[in-house]
Amino acid sequence: MKKFSRMTALLMALIMVFSLTACGSKDDGSGDGQTADKPVTIIANTSYAADNMHVQYMQKFADMVNEKTNGTVTINIEAGGALGIGSYDVLRAVKNNEVPMSEFVITGVEGDEKIMGIYGLPFLCQDYDQAQTIWELSIPYVEKVASEKWNQKILYAGPWPFTCLWSQKKVDSVADMKGLKTRAFDTNNALICEATGGTPYALPFSEVYSSLATNLIDSVLTSTQSAVDGKFWEVLEYYQPISMGLNLSAITISNDMWNRLSANQQQVMEECAQLIEDEIWDNIETVDATQAKVCTDNGITENPPSDEFKADLAAIAQDIHIDWLKEANDPDILALYNAYQEAVGGEAVDLG
């Protein structure tokens, strides 16, 4: 009887060992949850150079994800347009699985998806708090259209410094903008140029410096970050911080790639994405001021706009807002615009 009991105990112990080993190979929530996750390598595209602020945040995101998934998710960033996919083409490229993950400037894809252009409406936002408000209000709309129409998931988005006017001549008024040949990176920029009597040029950023050096253009609408990237102090004289428009860079991943990840890997990526997004928004004012100082330290003259100049530009912009909303002819876009105006104490628009 004792012998049988000892044999039975031994068998029971062996069964328990095998059971625990089997359980340990699965993500049952009791351990670190990593042992069952299959290793995945994701190629991530960006048009910007490795030292650009948003590419540095991408790298920080990639490193964080790799660490927190115990090395099971590796994100390899192809910077500087190495994959030949421009920011304007990202939605289509990710949808068609040309690349599984990419950074893109949101307003740059307005041609494919109208709602993406709302952030760049000139003078819609007057500060970064308002900028964050329009982004947070828009998230449900953007996530829905990205998933249902473009087969992808937006992981996070963060702002660039506000768009300002960089020029060879001093610009103090709307009248001074007449005749400017300005590189404009989106439709709304171009509309401001045309409304103030200038000529917009749709040039990739890689061609901006040479176009300034050869006088093809004499001004640029862009951020302090891009001004530093482009070494504008070598080809331009003035910086007018008119805070004309907001731009956001977003990181998107195809649903096909996303669905290859385990639930644990997905959760880690979402948590890391939120941390990175929060950090970008928390730091953007400091980044803007730091980059502006780099420019002025290198010889560019800062020329703050007068209240009259800003009011005149805002009046021009209001007409552009109305025309843009009419062209969009989309109740979701109008609802988003009016929800934002209500949140910041602005005036709602009734298109009749």
Image (cartoon, grey):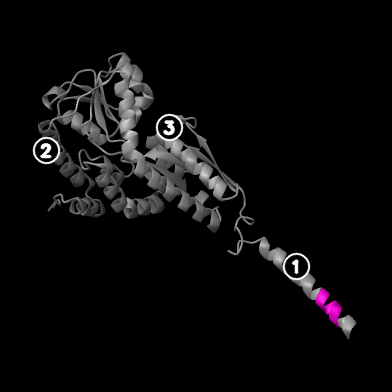
* Labels 1, 3: front one: 1
What percent of the width, then of the height, locates residue 82? 49, 30
Instruction: Report the Cα–Cα distance between label 1 and label 3.
Output: 53 Å
* Percent coordinates x, y for residue 61 in the rendering: 48, 43
x and y, in percent, of residue 35 in the image: 64, 56
Task: Estimate how packed mark 2 is, as few (under 14), some (14 to 19) or many (20 or more) residues with alpha carbons within 10 Å.
Answer: few
Query: Which sits in the foreground, 18 or 141?
Result: 18
Q: Residue at x 32, y 53 (%)?
A: 141
Q: Crowding near pointer 3: few (<14 within 10 Å), some, many (20+)? A: many
> Can you identify the residue that label 1 sits on?
17
Specify the segment rendered in magenta: 5-10
- Residue 124 appears at what percent x and percent y? 21, 42
- Specify whether 326 is left or right of 280: left
Q: What residue does disc 2 label?
A: 315
Q: Nearer the viewer, residue 312 or 64?
A: 64
Q: Is residue 274 left or right of residue 1?
A: left
> Would you say residue 338 sits in the magenta stretch?
no
Question: Which callout, 1 or 3, points at the residue further toward the start of the chain?
Answer: 1
Residue beneath disc 3: 47
Q: Amino acid at mark 3?
A: Ser
Q: Quadrant of the image for the N terminus?
A: bottom right
